[in-house]
Image (tube, rainbow, N blue to C red):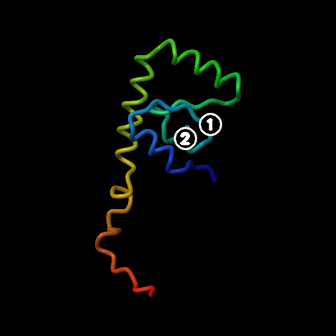
């Protein structure tokens, strides 16, 4: 099973542009943009060179990634779990 760490979404939540190694989860989640993936080092270098020269496209992916991250917060994914409402056990 493929996925990503929550750091992926934390980076996107800062409205930052991100390039990540490809996996099926990322390809599916970001199929319309928001995060750029690469297959190998040559692809990574090509992407870096391309997006350095195309700042508007970098900004587009950063904005879209931010919107996706805001739709994938803990509060939205787990609406019934509220840490503030939890009665923590006394572990003394």
Location of residue 80 (image quadrant): bottom left
Location of residue 22 (image quadrant): top right
Q: SS of the residue at dot 1?
A: loop
> Residue 61 bears which disc, if any?
none
Residue pictured at 40% horizontal, 17% vertical: 56
**What whole-number distance in Å separates the C-alpha atoms at marks 1 and 2?**
6 Å
Closer to us: 78 or 86: 86
Location of residue 75 (image quadrant): bottom left
Residue pictured at 32% horizontal, 63% vertical: 79
Vertical position of residue 18 compared to residue 9: above or below = above
Q: How many numbered dots are placed on residues in this image?
A: 2
Residue pictured at 44% horizontal, 45% vertical: 10
Q: SS of the residue at dot 2?
A: helix
Q: Check contact, mark 1 vs mark 2: CB within 8 A.
A: yes
Residue 4 image point, x, y percent: 56, 48
Q: Residue furthest front?
A: 92
Residue that mark 1 sits on? 22
Residue that mark 2 sits on? 26
Question: Which quadrant is home to the C terminus?
Answer: bottom left
Relative to 27, is 34 on the left or the right? left
Relative to 55, is 84 on the left or the right? left
Closer to us: 28 or 76: 76
Residue 59 image point, x, y percent: 40, 23
Residue 3 image point, x, y percent: 57, 49
Callout 1 crowding tier (Cα within 10 Å): few <14, some 14–19, many ≥20: some
Residue 86 image point, x, y percent: 33, 76
């Amino acid at each position: 099973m493929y996925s990503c760490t929550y750091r992926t979404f934390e980076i996107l939540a800062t409205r930052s542009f991100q390039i990540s190694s490809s996996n099926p989860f990322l390809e599916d989640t970001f199929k319309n943009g928001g995060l750029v993936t690469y297959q190998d080092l040559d692809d990574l270098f090509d992407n870096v060179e391309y997006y350095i020269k195309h700042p508007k496209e970098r900004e587009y992916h950063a904005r879209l990634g931010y919107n996706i991250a805001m739709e994938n917060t803990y509060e939205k994914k787990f609406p019934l779990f509220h840490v503030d409402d939890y009665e923590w056990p006394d572990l003394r």
